[in-house]
Image (tube, helix red, strand yellow):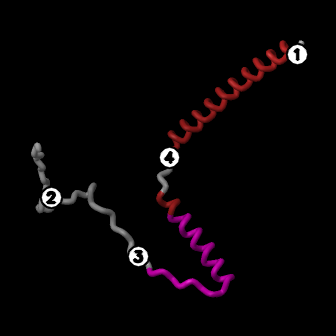
Amino acid sequence: MAETKVTRIKANDTPVKASKANAPKKQKPVRKERKEPKNPFTKALYGIGGYFKGAWFELRQVRWPSRKSTWGLTLAVILFSLFFVVIIVLLDLLFKSLFELIIT
């Protein structure tokens, strides 16, 4: 039987200096969950409010593109759309002419 050599790697116990780029972001303290009301109308209002609160939280995390990149992407969409319109029109004309040849 051949013996295999196993190398064990241990973590270094010396602390690593945290730079500003690698420093973890401060997190907001976690709020305690509120009790849901028993009244169905109030419960619905709490649900709607929670939806908009979550939506606003997600919108704050979005990284919006710059004006230059937005115009570039808009131009790309317009050019691709025009390209496919031309392809579809050409295919339509081709199939129309083939259909007329078959029928006549």
Q: Which mark is residue 30?
A: 3
Query: Which label lies toward us, 3 or 4?
Result: 3
Q: In the image, what residue type sits under mark 4?
A: Pro
- Residue projecting furthest to the bottom: 38
Q: Is residue 66 above or below residue 77?
A: below
Rendered location of residue 84, percent (x, y): 66, 28
Mark found first going from the N terminus, 4 or 2: 2
Read off the residue under disc 1: 103
Q: Quadrant of the N terminus?
A: top left
Bin the neighbour count of mark 1 within 10 Å (Cα to Cα): few under 14, some 14-19, many 20 and up: few
For residue 52: magenta? yes
Q: Is 90 left, or right, of 52 in this rendering?
A: right
- Check disc 2 and give the amino acid type: Ala
Of callouts 3 and 4, the N-terminal one:
3
At mark 1, the secondary structure is helix
Q: Label for residue 11?
A: 2
* Label 4: which secondary element: loop
Residue type marked 3: Val
Q: Which mark is residue 36?
A: none
Lateral position of residue 49 relative to residue 23, left or right: right
Q: Which residues are magenta?
A: 32-57
Which tag is nearer the camera, tag 4 or tag 1?
Answer: 1
Depth order, front residue of 94/86: 94
Q: Quadrant of the C terminus?
A: top right
Residue at position x 13%, y 53% in the image: 8
Residue type at the position of mark 1: Ile
